[in-house]
Image (cartoon, rainbow, N blue to C red):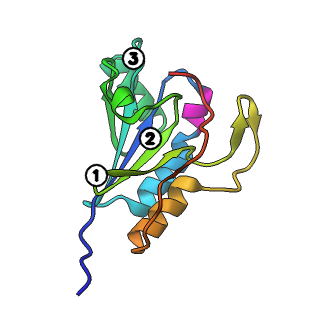
Amino acid sequence: PQNNEFLIEVSVFLSESCPIAQYMTLPLKNSYNQFASDSVIFTAYFPNLLSTQESIYNFKQKYSIPFSCLDDNTGEMVSLLGATVYSEVFIIFNGEVVYKGMIDDSYTSLGQWSPAENHYLYDILEQLIGGGGVDFYETIPVGCLI
């Protein structure tokens, strides 16, 4: 019998004031709604010194974010994962980072938006949950600098 026990952690870095982070809440929610379970856990981290419990709560409400939004003022998660910009996402499969980078490629550079052609977060989650392995890879995330 195949062992179907796994844990996927999706960690994303957001900022209340970054337009790209605001925009990326929609593809994040879409992936959450499709894949979230006891084995697939989403968490947003706010490593901005100006973030407060209230500003994070207001952002969560405004963009209807259905998963945990945590203050990372200490930068602990930024250091742990090596995050560089807001809306950078990390997919951790059974304790190992298998992907870091863009949620999707709708922003190729700051201010340059177009409909996404690659839905990295969604596609990798679909592959992992379907039992396919994923070799580590990364894309260069676009967003406001942390």
Label 3 or label 2, whichever lies nearer to me, is: 3
Q: Amino acid at mark 3?
A: Ser
- The range drawn in magenta is 19-23
Q: Position of residue 139 (x, y in %)?
A: 59, 45
**Separation of marks 3 and 1 at Cα, in angstroms:** 28 Å
Q: Is residue 66 magenta?
A: no
**Separation of marks 3 and 2 at Cα, in angstroms:** 18 Å
Name the image quarter holding residue 34: bottom left
Q: Which residue is mark 3?
A: 51
Q: Amino acid at mark 1?
A: Gly
**Separation of marks 1 and 2 at Cα, in angstroms:** 28 Å
* Marked residue nearer the N-terminal end (3 or 1): 3
Residue 64, label in figure: 2
* Marked residue nearer the N-terminal end (1 or 2): 2
Using the image, determine if residue 20 lies above or below residue 55. below
Mark 2: few, some, or many residues within 10 Å (few <14, many ≥20)? few
Instruction: Provide the major secondary structure of the magenta segment.
Output: helix
Front residue of this view, candidates 67 and 91: 91
Quadrant (top left/top right/bottom left/bottom right) for the N terminus: bottom left
Residue name at image x 52 percent, y 35 percent: 87
129 left or right of 145? left
Q: Residue furthest top?
A: 50
Label 3 or label 1, whichever lies nearer to me, is: 1
87 left or right of 98? right
* Marked residue nearer the N-terminal end (3 or 2): 3
Using the image, determine if residue 93 lies above or below residue 15. below
Residue name at image x 44 percent, y 73 percent: 132
Q: Amino acid at mark 2?
A: Ser
> Is label 1 in contact with label 2 (beta carbons under 8 Å)?
no
Residue 95, label in figure: 1
